[in-house]
Amino acid sequence: MKKLILVTALSFLLIQCDKNNVSRDNMSQVSKGLSADEVIEMVGSPDKIIELATVKLNGDKLELWEYGDNQIISMQGGIVLSVILNANENQEMAKELIEHKELAPK
């Protein structure tokens, strides 16, 4: 249940992003439902992948793909959930979600 709440919270949080190596125009073309391969083809591989959780029901991984220090794509099971074009604007909420994840039982 906590993971479902986390996924829902991330979906609402992850709406817009800006990056050093990926142009805002390219990143703005990434949309919900695209596959990981389609994202990589459009904007390249992420600089960093943070695994937040694994959904026990189906084994899907919930990940944040970071591009530079300001753009994030949330992925579940290799599919885009949402895109943040300016993570700095959402930094406090993202920090709280990551802290919540660290406090969650494993």
Image: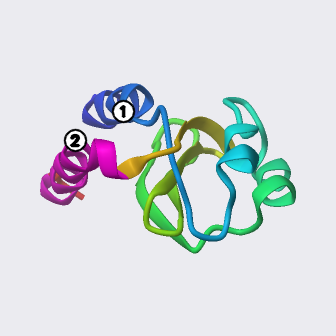
From which residue to which does the magenta span run?
Answer: 88-103
Please give left or right for residue 104 compared with residue 46 in the image.
Answer: left
Residue type for callout 2? Met
Q: Does the residue at mark 1 contact the one at mark 2 (Cβ under 8 Å)?
A: yes
The reply to whether residue 52 is in sight is yes
Residue 41 is drawn in which quadrant?
bottom right
- The answer to whether residue 63 shows anywhere in this view is no
The way the protein has been coloured in the rendering is rainbow
- What is the count of numbered marks? 2
Q: Quadrant of the N terminus?
A: top left
At 46% across and 43% down in the image, what residue appears?
56
At 39% from the left edge and 49% from the top edge, which residue is drawn? 87
Which residue does the numbered mark 2 point to in the structure image?
93
Q: Is residue 74 above or below residue 103?
A: above
10 lies left or right of 60: left
Q: Main secondary structure of the magenta part?
A: helix
The answer to whether 29 is drawn above or below residue 99 in the figure is above
Q: Position of residue 20 (x, y in %)?
A: 57, 69
User: Which mark identifies residue 13?
Assistant: 1
Q: Is residue 33 above or below residue 25?
A: above
**Which of the two residues, 51 or 47, is positioned nearer the viewer here?**
47
Q: Is residue 104 magenta?
A: no
Residue at left offset 52%, top offset 69%:
68
Q: Circle 2 — which element?
A: helix
Q: Is residue 99 magenta?
A: yes
The kind of secondary structure element at disc 1 is helix
- How far apart in space, not on screen, are marks 1 and 2 (Cα)? 7 Å
Q: x%, y% of residue 72?
A: 50, 52
The circle drawn on residue 65 is none
